[in-house]
Amino acid sequence: MTALHGALVARIARTGPISVADYMTECLLHPTHGYYTTRDPLGAEGDFTTAPEISQMFGEMIGLWLAQVWMDQGAPGEFALVELGPGRGTLMADALRATARVPGFHAGLRLHLVEASPALRARQEAALQGHEVTFHDHPASLPDLPTYLIANEFFDALPIRQFQRAKTGWHERMIGVVDGQLAWGLAPEAPVEALADRVADTHEGQVVEWNASAQALAADFGNRIEALGGAALILDYGDEVSIGDTLQAVRGHAPVDALASPGATDLTAHVAFGPLASASRARASRLTPQGVFLERLGITARAEALAAKLQGAALDSHIAAHRRLTHPSEMGTLFKVLALTPTHCPAPPGLEPA
Ligand code: SAH
């Protein structure tokens, strides 16, 4: 049993069952026992791997995308380059290397990273040596500058609430205690205003997830980008709308029980992109599979150029990495891309207007 398990059992005994959102927040961000607050979970020895850790090509493509959008908007002299949840800083380091020769881009950029984990902040500083970095606990403190923002596998870590469809209302899925152990339960049926439009496309017993924090962030970034210029590029696993229970716990690259070791396993949920697009005042792109997006940006030409310098095992693993990022049976289709750009600007590279 983890220390956080004991703390949660005591809290529930005192004040009653908690929502999935409260559970995720405690498990991921608890100041002393939280998953992200206490470790670097990435890489082969960690619990999961992400696209920038698979190949340098991922961060390079995104860096060039950001620089192109910046140029299309008249190359504003001073701007914020922002990443939410930068992990080990690999994506940003690759993006900065790829854009080093874009005239004026590095001179104008102010690097702002939103990161909750002290362990990962240290990794990011090391990866980005030579660049001045400002850290933020929350996007609310970002400066009022044109904002070019990237979030890869960040929105999936934001807390969701889950609701099971009843006759006309919903039962919220809650976490309580049975015989001293955390256990699933259902709150009494009640109407849920935020899910009013989901009664028509669901049937009794189906689960729908609602991510209030993600929608609030999309609304904030939409306002910021529409008013100040810039763009947001959100990459994650998910789809247009939420349907079904997608809460996922992972440890050592394998799925585990979400309630078994709170604070010691990663917890994520699929991102529902439709509500993010609707929450934004800026223009949302069409939701596009990651593989299609990367192909349109020229990842295959870049892969071939890199392959020319490789042989043997290094060449094999480079080819496998390209396939893993783009192939429909790997990350190419499950992962999606959504961009927000000002309504008066041209559509960004690789993405159509919605
Ligand atoms: N983008 C990176 C890491 C993804 S893991 C990559 O692609 O490799 C999720 C990242 O988001 C981690 O850096 C984690 O510490 C951070 N994070 C999760 N929830 C957060 C929150 N609420 N506020 C700030 N950072 C958060």
Image: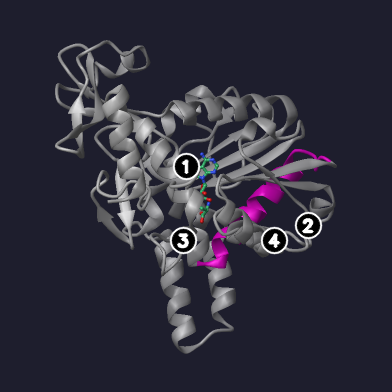
Query: Which x, y percent locates residue 220?
Result: 60, 26
Q: Nearer the N terminus, badge 2 or badge 3?
A: 3
Between the C-alphas of marks 2 and 4, the distance is 18 Å
For mark 2, does the 10 Å Cα neighbourhood hold few (<14), some (14 to 19), or many (20 or more) residues? some
Q: Nearer the N terminus, badge 2 or badge 1?
A: 1
SS category of the residue bearing label 2 = loop
SS category of the residue bearing label 4 = loop
Taking the spot 72% from the left edge, 24% from the top edge, the residue there is 227
Query: Which x, y percent locates residue 235?
Result: 49, 46
Please give the residue where the numbered disc 2 appears in the rendered image.
Answer: 102
Quadrant in the picture for residue 200: top left
Please give the residue where the numbered disc 4 appears in the rendered image.
Answer: 128
Q: Nearer the N terminus, badge 4 or badge 3?
A: 3
Between the C-alphas of marks 3 and 1, the distance is 16 Å
Between the C-alphas of marks 2 and 1, the distance is 37 Å
Disc 3 under 8 Å from ligand 1? The reply is yes
Q: Look at the picture and state if 90 lies above or below 175.
A: below
Res 288 seen here: no
User: Tag 1: residue type?
Assistant: Leu
Residue in front for this viewpoint, 282 or 85: 85
For mark 1, does the 10 Å Cα neighbourhood hold few (<14), some (14 to 19), or many (20 or more) residues? some
Between the C-alphas of marks 2 and 3, the distance is 30 Å
SS category of the residue bearing label 1 = helix
Between marks 4 and 1 in the image, the one whose residue lies nearer the viewer: 1
Residue 169 as seen in the image, left or right of residue 2: left
Please give the residue where the numbered disc 1 appears in the rendered image.
Answer: 29
Residue in front for this viewpoint, 183 or 86: 183
Taking the spot 32% from the left edge, 50% from the top edge, the residue there is 2
- Give the residues drawn in magenta, as a range: 55-76
Q: Nearer the N terminus, badge 3 or badge 1?
A: 1
Residue in front for this viewpoint, 286 or 126: 126
